[in-house]
Image: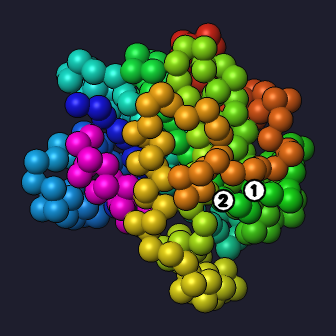
Amino acid sequence: MKTVVITGATSGIGLSSALLLAREGYAVIGIGRSADHCRQAQEMIQAAAPAATVRYFTADLMQQNEVNRVAGEISACLEESGGGLHALINNAGCVRSWYTTTEEGYEQVFALNVLSCFLLTGRLLPFLLQAKGRVIMTGSGSHQGIKVCWNDVMLRKRYNPLTAYKQSKLCNMLFARGLNERFAPCGLHAYVVDPGLVNTDIGNKQTGGLVNFIWNWRKRHGVQPEIPARTYAFLCGQEPAPAGLYYHLCRENTYSRQVTSENAEQLFSLGERLCGIRLDQGEVQTA
């Protein structure tokens, strides 16, 4: 049985993807921030798919000590089963109305949307390589029309919620490209899914004012999470692994010209420094 790990798996796209993949016969490991929500999600999936193998772990992925802890727990779980990791779906994400930092002092949108993906992928990389697996990022068409502010990626000097979110989605594209350039020869493939406008609560969680108001209006025009979930299942199920990078509605899509090897390399250098980890020649090393 192939195993899939999904972050942000207690609601929205993550929960819908977990349910769909469980129904398709994958062993699903979900990660959520709330223990109660994790329990409820697991019970819902087990009720809908009684034969499914489902397990949830609780972690606040904004905090790197939490990422390292849950990565250790999942690693132990994978070692017990004796199998590799078929897919890691880095879906957890957030929006913030104001400049807010994590325990490490990193801006929260960048910490969750970018650095948690980098660190969790790095920690689980040996299992992904063992299975010649896939890393799937939740992206957005909003990655278009922006550049990474390399001199101030946390946007400390001039914070703007939309800029922070758009930049984080461009970084997701760069991370996927960088993974492919490093590890495709080892059989690992990385993708970004553009779910489109989806009716979820991402813009309502720990936001306020204008961000909360705009998202309440926009999400009413979005599709249900079950629609983009099909693209994650498509990328998990295709054999051989699809060759593209950026997908929407199960089809390869065009993406920003900013998604270059040079920018991907710069993101990897930054991620390694901020996460204290090195991803080198298929091996994970503590920096």
Prevailing SS of the magenta stretch = helix
In the image, 39 versus 60, the foreground residue is: 39
Question: Is 14 contained in the magenta span?
Answer: yes
Q: Secondary structure at mark 1?
A: helix
Numbered range of the magenta stretch: 11-26
Q: Classify mark 1: residues with Cα within 10 Å, few (<14), some (14-19) or many (20+).
A: many
Q: Kindly identify the residue that appears in the image at 53 percent across and 72 percent down.
A: 198
* Number of residue marks: 2
Residue 143's disc is 1
Q: Kindly identify the residue that appears in the image at 61 percent across and 10 percent down.
A: 281
Image quadrant in which the C terminus is located:
top right
**Mark 2: which amino acid?**
Ser
Distance CA(mark 2)–CA(mark 1): 6 Å
* Res 128 → quadrant: top left
Residue 140's disc is 2
Residue 112 in view (yes/no):
no
